[in-house]
Image (cartoon, rainbow, N blue to C red):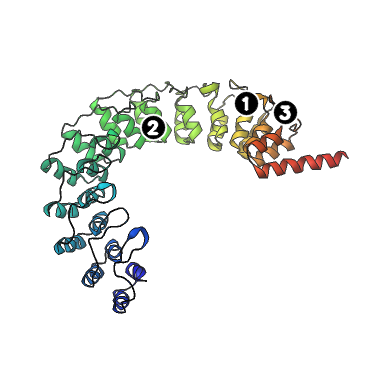
Amino acid sequence: MLHNACRRGTLAQVRQILSHELVDINSRGKCGWTPVMIAVEGGRRELVDLLVKQGGDMTLTDDDGNTVLHVASIKGYLKIMTYILSTKTVDVNITGHCKRTAVMAAARFGHRKVFDLLAKNGSDLSTVDSDGNNILHIACIGGNVEIVKYILNNVNVDINSRGHNRKTPLMFAINFGNVRVFELLVSKDCILPIVQENETNILHMACVKGNVDMVRHILKKNIVSVDGEDSMGKTPVMLAAESGHTDVFQLLVSKQCDIHKTCHDGHNILHTSCALGHVDIVRCILKEGLINIDSYGKNDMTPVMFAAQNGQRDIFDLLVNNGCDMSQKDKNGNTVLHMACIGGSKYIVERILSKEPVDINSRGQSQGTPAMMAAACGHKDAFDLLVNRGADLTLVDGRGFGVHHLACMGGHETMVEHIQNIFEVRDSDVL
């Protein structure tokens, strides 16, 4: 009752509940929160004052070890923070979740005024959290450039120090897309050509995040190769394409990056974009004629196969309308129809069947037919399309398994029942 009143009720309701002394004013609710924590989280200054005067204990911690100081810091409530500090009841350097102090929480969420207040009231800015992050790492995550400036000017901290996953402050700024913080760190001569253990450099990271201004800044500095590979053999343009960042992709292309490279899996940017459904990037590649529309990827799969396998109907249409070769097979003998049956898009399967003469019972991997693959993957609509077009359900693959076996092996109960019903109807028709 008291927790709910502190969250949604009026001051009078809370006062009435407290007057009857029916509940413990420091009782625990969800996540170990006390009524006063709830009042602080809601920014209700007068309610906080009432609870404290009635015996609300501000020194208590929740299940994560956070106090009301942490709660006020996360929310950025300056007046409530001022009140809490004035009571001198809570240790300003007590650590909570991930061994972080209140000032760390203020830095993480970019609350400059609260950060300044805590710093003036004795917060230890040299604390390191359980992830190995110091106050500079956390401020670079939060993205408040004024807080970062304060730390650089007033705290003895290494601008290139390593935090969680051996990331530097600059890396955190890139990861969280904080351009102004990034530019500030660069102006302070931090080390730029940094490579992580997986060979990821700052350009890779910026391309994944898709911040075109940050990418442009890194390229202008000419500190890392525009075609540098990470541990997977992926270049910046591959990562931009993979992440669907069209503006970054176009910027890298304009900088004469090598667009024909393939990663260690054998995929190029067109294969990846088709698989993941990045229509604008595929359109750009096709419009500029950057890569062969029928280029081979892993297992000799073509872009249209990737689109079909992943049910990317818009990209499938785009490739077909641009004249891709629908007759090719991969190393396992799979056709585009096999891949479409794996993907399960009824629309794509229907388009393939209506586009040109297709061997509906063609053999692919393990001598499987398109119908077998649809059954194995539990795609009823695609399966029914094939059945209606004359797919032979009596065939077995190279292991002796038929559509019924494969549906059972795939664990698709509805599909199993559907196939069984088809066989029963056919048997009755024969009789």
Residue in the image at 69% along x and 41% along y: 416
Position of 266 relative to 92 (above/below): above
Residue denoted by label 2: 240
Check disc 2 and give the amino acid type.
Ala
Position of 256 relative to 38 (above/below): above
Check disc 1 and give the amino acid type.
Thr
Quadrant (top left, top right, bottom left, bottom right) of the C terminus? top right
Front label number (1 vs 3): 3
The answer, for residue 175, to whether it is visible in the render is yes
CA distance for labels 2 and 3: 43 Å
Q: Residue 335's mark?
A: 1
The kind of secondary structure element at disc 3 is loop
CA distance for labels 2 and 1: 29 Å
The kind of secondary structure element at disc 1 is loop
Location of residue 343 in the rendering, given as x and y in whole percent from the top left corner:
58, 35
The kind of secondary structure element at disc 2 is helix
Residue denoted by label 3: 396
Residue nearest the viewer, comparing 111 with 395: 395
Would you say 293 lies left or right of 254 here?
A: right
